[in-house]
Image: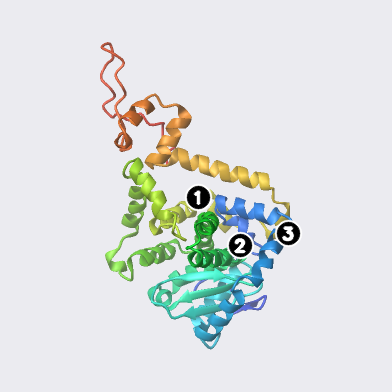
Amino acid sequence: MGEDMSDGHEHNGHEHVPSRQRRRFPGISSRTYEHPADRSALVALRKLSGFDTVFKALSGLLPERSLRLLFLSDSVRVSDQQFAHLNVMLRDACYILDLEKVPPMYVNQDPQPNAMCIGLDEPIIVVTTGLVELLDEEEMRAVVGHEVGHALSGHSVYRTILLFLTSLAVRVAWIPLGNLAIMAIVTGLREWFRKSELSADRAGLLVGQDLQASMRGLMKIAGGNHLHEMNVDAFLAQAEEYEAGGDLRDSVLKILNVLPRSHPFTTVRAAELKKWAESRDYQRIMDGHYPRRDEDKDTSVRDSWRESANHYGTHVKSSKDPLMKLVTDLAGGAGDLGDRVRRGFGGFTGPSAKPSQGPESGPSDPSGDDRPPSDGS
């Protein structure tokens, strides 16, 4: 079962002084909060014999040591003496998620709000001054939990490789075939990277245990420090409008817009996190029912892939995106699909009237809604 934290005690070397009591999760496995696509990819990678060894063998080619020295020499290391409030949050997050070794954290001078967890041998966390100045204590606590979630999931290895390959792609851009090969890998890693962000958002919520603080933090990242001008419900409505709006052209543009990004769009992250926070899965975790990391070795790759496939199947069926509706129509053999195609992309902007069946046919349904029934979402 989960445990309540007590003020002013020391646990496993982690001194924590939380502003309020929070549930902790002894022995929690990262599978608990990982997004289905993220989790299935990581389980499969961990099952491959020697996979991590091969990746770490690349450390001679990767500038990890250079990165560590750079942050050590040109950033401020968080400690009891420097950014002490962040140090408390970091130890608190590691205690809640039962991460035994506290990763080093650095504050880097950069007005752009950002944070990252990188490193091959050991993860290090970096937050920018822009982020520290933007967020309040509870919002920052969720961000620190987000990065500790990356560390617990082992994301830092693959994120470091992505950073290196992105830099390499720029250097060899003048070599057409070489650049294409590298960019193909980068594109695949970015897709996983975006899913890993959804996982880490969940970890941040488990650490902060304050959904409103997580929502505020995401809104500030999108719109700056103007909370008095923003509204959570209106912000989430943007995500729904983004998903449902437009026609197939907009669906294609959404894909093109997200491809070069390392993070999902902020409104989408907020909507995904709120949906998870309201789920039965989240409540079970808070009640102390969650996978333990000592069970990770028994995890079935097949079951993980099946869960991921089921997740995407449900997502496609319930999605309001025009392209996802088309996929559903194709799978269901919708009768008016040919008519929609003949009328072009504009035929997918909304519900269409059913085609006439001849003079005996009555008028089409005034609602014009020929979409498959909704599952309530």
Q: Which residue is mark 1?
A: 279
Q: Secondary structure at mark 3?
A: loop
Which residue in the rendered view is the most extreme toward the bottom? 81
**Of the pair 121 and 91, the residue shown nearer to us:** 121
* 283 displayed left or right of 321: right
Q: Earlier in the sequence, mark 1 or mark 3?
A: 3
In this rendering, the answer to whether 374 lies above or below 109 is above
Q: Amino acid at mark 2?
A: Ser
Q: Residue 177: image x %, image y %?
A: 53, 56
Instruction: Count neighbours of disc 3 (C-alpha within 10 A) and say few if under 14, some if 14 to 19, many if 20 or more.
Output: few
Q: Secondary structure at mark 1?
A: loop
* 186 displayed left or right of 121: left
- Which mark lies nearer to you, 1 or 3? 3
In this rendering, the answer to whether 19 lies above or below 154 is below
Cα gap from disc 2 to disc 1, whole angstroms? 22 Å
Examine the rendering and report whether any part of residue 5 can be seen: no
Q: Which residue is mark 3?
A: 50
